[in-house]
Amino acid sequence: MKQDIHPDYHTIKIVMTDGSEFITRSTWGNEGDVMNLDIDPKSHPAWTGGQQQLMDRGGRVSRFQKKFSGFIKEGAKADAPAKK
């Protein structure tokens, strides 16, 4: 193996969204750094079965809702074609 071509592999602390912590090894950051996760398997809908916790950062969700609020008519099914 060639010398001095691999990144430093050291221990860091991971802090999950619920506050639980664990120590792991990574090439991210420096020795002893703390990585605070915004999304993890305990909060992401892909792992929780669809329950999601929306975090509106900078009004993105509200801007999206405002922009597309009239796109689907009230009472219409999402998979049904729109009537003209």
Image: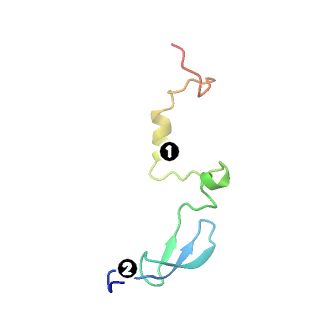
Query: What residue is at 55 percent from the left and 20 percent from the top?
Result: 81
Q: Position of residue 46 (x, y in %)?
A: 60, 52
Q: Position of residue 57 (x, y in %)?
A: 47, 53
Q: Does residue 23 sit above or below 45 in this rendering?
A: below
Query: What residue is at 59 percent from the left and 27 percent from the top?
Result: 79
**Label 2 vs 1, first from the N-terminus:** 2
Mark sitting on residue 7: 2
Q: Give the color scheme: rainbow, by chain, secondary structure or one colour.
A: rainbow
Work out how far the residue at label 2 is from the one at label 1, CA to CA, in angstroms: 38 Å
Q: Which type of secondary structure does the marked residue at label 1 adopt? A: helix
Q: Residues within 10 Å of mark 2 (few under 14, many from 20)?
A: few
Disc 2 marks a residue whose amino acid type is Pro
Query: What residue is at 44 percent from the left and 51 percent from the top?
Result: 58
Q: Residues within 10 Å of mark 1 (few under 14, many from 20)?
A: few
Res. 7 image quadrant: bottom left
Res. 4 image quadrant: bottom left
Question: In terms of depth relative to the viewer, which is nearer, 66 or 42?
Answer: 42
Which residue is situated farthest in the bottom direction here?
3
Query: What residue is at 63 percent from the left and 23 percent from the top?
Result: 75
Q: Nearer the viewer, mark 2 or mark 1?
A: 2
Q: Position of residue 64 (x, y in %)?
A: 47, 39
Q: Are marks 2 and 1 in contact (CB under 8 Å)?
A: no
Res. 80 image quadrant: top right
Which residue was labeled with disc 1?
A: 61
Q: Position of residue 29 (x, y in %)?
A: 42, 77
Disc 1 marks a residue whose amino acid type is Val
Tally the marks.
2
Q: Which type of secondary structure does the marked residue at label 2 adopt? A: loop
Image quadrant in which the N terminus is located: bottom left
